[in-house]
Amino acid sequence: MDLQDKETTSGEIIPVVIVGNGPSGICLSYLLSGYTPYLSPEGWHPNALLQSKLAERPHLSLLEQDLQYLCEGLEGRSSNPVAVLFDSLLLPDSDFGLDHTSPLEWRYEPQRAVPHLVLGKGPPGGAWHAMEGSMLTLSLANWMELPGLKLKDWMRDKRRNVRNDRATPAEIASYYQHYISQMSLEENFACGTTVTSVSREPGEQDGSPPCWRVSGLQRREGEILGDGCSVAEEVPFSLLAHNVVLATGTHDVPARLGVEGESLPFVCHSFWELEAAISRGELDRSSDPVLVVGAGLTAADAVLAAHHLNTSVYHVFRRPVTDPGLIFNQLPKLLYPEYHKVHQMMTQQQHQSTLSPPEQAQNLHSTPSSSSHPPPSSSSSYPGYLSFPCHRVAAFHPDRKCVLESDSGEQAVVQVSKALVLIGAHPNLSFLHNNGRPLGVSPGEPISCRRNPIDVDPFTNRVLAADGPGMYAMGPLVGENFVRFLKGGALAIAGDLSKRRRWGSGEDVVPAEVLDS
């Protein structure tokens, strides 16, 4: 969509603008386009309490019901109550490996549609298009799907069996693109857009209420050159909206350690830099070890990639391997064998503080030339790997020596070929005042999915510290990293907009000031 057609020089105010076109924005667009969930006449939920609540007013859509009442008594793997509710309705008892039919039915009711725009830098699907194409996703395939289109059915049409009930990021990205086409959502999406500012506009003297101004640049193909190629150009746009939804995800800016030498050229902050080094032939079994910092799944992918090349690995992370908060301790072994393997490596081959890493290696190696490498002994299940639990990186030096420090203050120096700092990422909220920090649970701290999400009302997803009413946030920005749970944010927002609409004329979403004044 060309946003110049939507310029608000005439004073038109769009009811809803969604910043971010990943699965969060796609799911919300689906609900705002008139697709409405109801309890099916034959619907049944295995949770007797929830079933009885749903049966009290089956004629009402889920958007019209009291979500807080429905959420009472439910438990799940998310801290957001509406996320647990919607996940339980879409995939009943899926945490127990059961495949119950959802008690919901979806009805297309165009009279409920709310005009909206979804803005995104790339194609619909967001960060899924930037992920490595062959790795299996963490979640089961049906946990990745959006309402109304079964992922397994789509995969079957593509004539591919979903190995181990999981799909690849490339397949998921393709599914999300197909989804907006299948659901006829294309007219709501404006891709190639970079939002540079979201600010509050005061009301006009004619009595029109305050609203949000969303400004940015849209990339478009420019004039055709003599060789037939076109030159891309960025065209400014500016929109007015009664409501704005922050759905950008958190994969934009890699997190940094903030230590000496972190900007040296051998220190990388993304898995893709490791892939590029591998494709250039920079790493093999004769290379100095790769240092991997972090204990998340991306760090585990890096360990596996280096291990596949027979390149030795030093693996540094802050937590003990038994920490229940460690993601590996939360994954079923049978479903995630590759990550279970990494966890075994982390557990079985730990650095011993009484010996330096070279000394440990030298005791187990037959040749002195390999003394800088982790131990590939006959007694080792995973040759060439050494973990450093409860350690941090103190410094990187230009000679590719890295100083590691334990919680007790003991230091070890290791020689590496590359260092990969894979400790998560922060969202790019540069379009908000002070990068959105005032909106966090801990105001003043950087917004982070795990440590400092945006503070929202748990049943409406309204941003509590926004400059004015009508700002919402969803997805990783509010702590939901898994697709199966971010759909709850879409339900909370769509439900709140629906309730506000019923307070007004029925023709448009009521400006938030009407309800909050």
Image: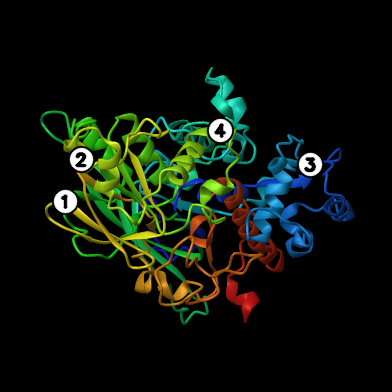
CA distance separating discs 3 and 1: 58 Å
Q: Which mark is residue 288?
A: 2
Cα distance in 3D space between marks 2 and 4: 50 Å
**Identity, as a three-letter code, of the amino acid under mark 4:** Gln
Amino acid at the residue labelled 1 = Arg
Mark 1 = which residue? Answer: 400
Q: Residue at x 54, y 17 (%)?
A: 159
Q: Are marks 4 and 1 in contact (CB under 8 Å)?
A: no
The residue pinned by badge 4 equals 182
Percent from the top left, x then y, of residue 50? Answer: 82, 53
Q: Residue 509 appears at what percent x and percent y?
A: 61, 63
Q: Which residue is mark 3?
A: 103
Marks 1 & 2, CB-CB < 8 Å contact? yes
Q: Secondary structure at mark 3?
A: loop
Q: Earlier in the sequence, mark 4 or mark 1?
A: 4
| Disc nearer the start of the sequence (2/3) | 3
Q: Is residue 406 left or right of residue 182?
A: left
Task: Specify the color scheme.
Answer: rainbow
Label 4: how many residues lie within 10 Å, few (<14), some (14-19) or many (20+)?
few
